[in-house]
Image (cartoon, rainbow, N blue to C red):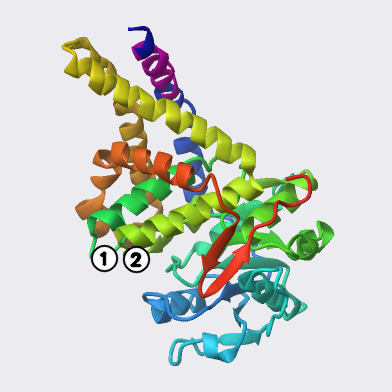
Amino acid sequence: MFWYWLFAGPALLLAFLSLLGGRKRAAYVMRRLSEEPTNFPPASVIVPVKGWDEGLRENLAALASLDYPDYELLIAARSAEDIPPGVLPARARIVLAHGKDADTGEKVQNLAAAVRATRKVSGIFAFADSDGRVPSGWLRALAAPLSEPGVGASTGYRWYTPEPASLWSLLRGVWDAAAGGTLGPGRNRFLWGGATAILKETFFEIRVLEYWKNTVSDDYALSAALRAAGLSIAYAPGALVPCIEGTGARVFFAWARRQMMLTRVHAVNLWRQALVAHVIYCGGMVAGVVACAGGHAWAALVLAAQLAPGMWAGRRRAVLAKRALAGCRDWFRRHGWAHFWLVPAATWIWLVVLLLSARGDTIRWRGYTYKLKRPPGG
C-alpha cells in the first residue's frame, strides 16, 4: 500500500487543487463577457498567411467585418505565392516581407514587416492567426483591458470546434483547452499569438521587435518582453476564437510535440511543472487500476475521486466557452460532452506529448525546419 499512496495521495491532492480558483475564474470570465467598454482607439489587425488553411476565405472575411469603429486589416506573407487566390477581403492590405533571416521564423519576420507598415493613426496592434474564425466582437474584447493599470497586452485563446468531429479532432480540442483553462484573472504566464492586442506605444517601449529577432515563437518572445518590463497579460474571454479544422492522430501528435518543444525552450519551468504534474496524475491512475485489480474495492472510489475534479473542470471550461461563443451553441450541444468524458484520455496524451518533447531542438513548420535556441536568461 505504500507504493499505492505514494502516487495516489499526491494525485488526489493535485486533482482537488485544480478546482481551486475555478469559481474565481468563472466569475472573471462572466464579468469580462458582460462588460461594455467605450474606449476604442484606432487599430491595426495583422494576420500572417502561409498557404491554405481550412476555411481560409471565411476566416479572413470574419477579420474584415469586425464590430469595431476604426481599424485596418493587414495580410502579411513572405511572398505573393504564399497567399492563395480568391481568399482576400476587399478591405485587406497586403504586406510582403521577403524575409531572408535564417535565424528568425518566417511568421515572425512577416509580423515585423507588417508592424512597420501600419498606418500612423493606429494606437493598437492586434494579431490574429489565419486558421481561426474570430467572432465580430473579437477586437473590442482585446482592446478593453489595455487601458487598465499595469496591463501590457491582452490575449484570447482558441477553441477547437471541428466539423466533422472525429475522435482525434475532439481529443485535440480537449487537450488544448486544458492550457487555455489556465488563463484567467491575475498575471497570466503566457499569451496566444492568434488573439493578442497591445498598445502601439507599449509595443515599441518594451522593444518587441528586438525580442522577435532570432526566435521562432512570436508569442513567447512577446510574453518575455512584457515580463521584463513588469507588465501583465490580461485574459480577454470575449476574444476566444473557434477553429474548425479537423485532424488525425499523426498530425495532432506532431503539432502538439512542436507546441511543447517551444514551451520547453522558452518557458522551461512551465514545461517542467506540467511534466511533474502529469507523471504524478497518471501514476495515480495506474496505482488505482492496479489496486482495483488486486481486489481492493475501495481503490475504485479513490480513483473516481481523482478523476472527477479534472472531468468537472473540463465541463466547466466548455460551459464558459459556450457563453463566449454564442455562434457555436449547436456545436456545443452536439459535442460538448467530449470536454467531460475525454478528459482522462487527454491527460495521458499530455504525458505522452511532454515526454516526446523532452528531447530535440529542431521543429518543422509549414515547410521550414528551425533550430530552437533558448533565449537569453531563458
Residue highlighted by disc 1: 163
Residue highlighted by disc 2: 244
Please identify the dominant SS of the magenta region: helix
| Magenta stretch bounds | 4-14
What's the residue type where badge 2 is placed?
Ile
Residue 101 image point, x, y percent: 73, 75
In the rendered image, the quadrant that contains the N terminus is top left
Which image quadrant is residue 250 in? bottom left
Residue 139 image point, x, y percent: 56, 64
Q: Residue at x 72, y 50 (%)?
A: 224
On screen, residue 151 versus residue 93, left or right, reads right
Q: Residue at x 38, y 42 (%)?
A: 317
Q: Is residue 43 visible?
A: no
- Work out how far the residue at label 2 is from the one at label 1, CA to CA, in angstroms: 6 Å
- Which residue occupies the extreme right position in the image? 205
On screen, residue 120 versus residue 138, left or right, reads right
On screen, residue 355 versus residue 189, left or right, reads left
Foreground: 65 or 187? Answer: 187
Rendered position, 369 above or below 52:
above
Numbered disc 2: secondary structure = loop
- The answer to whether mark 2 and mark 1 are in CB contact below 8 A is yes
Mark nearer the N terminus (2 vs 1): 1
Numbered disc 1: secondary structure = loop
Residue 80 image point, x, y percent: 57, 91
Q: Does the magenta segment cover residue 130?
A: no
In the rendered image, the quadrant that contains the C terminus is top right
Which image quadrant is residue 45 in? bottom right
Rendered position, 240 above or below 228:
below
Q: Does the magenta segment cover residue 7?
A: yes
**How many numbered markers are drawn?**
2
What's the residue type where badge 1 is placed?
Glu
On screen, residue 288 versus residue 179, left or right, reads left
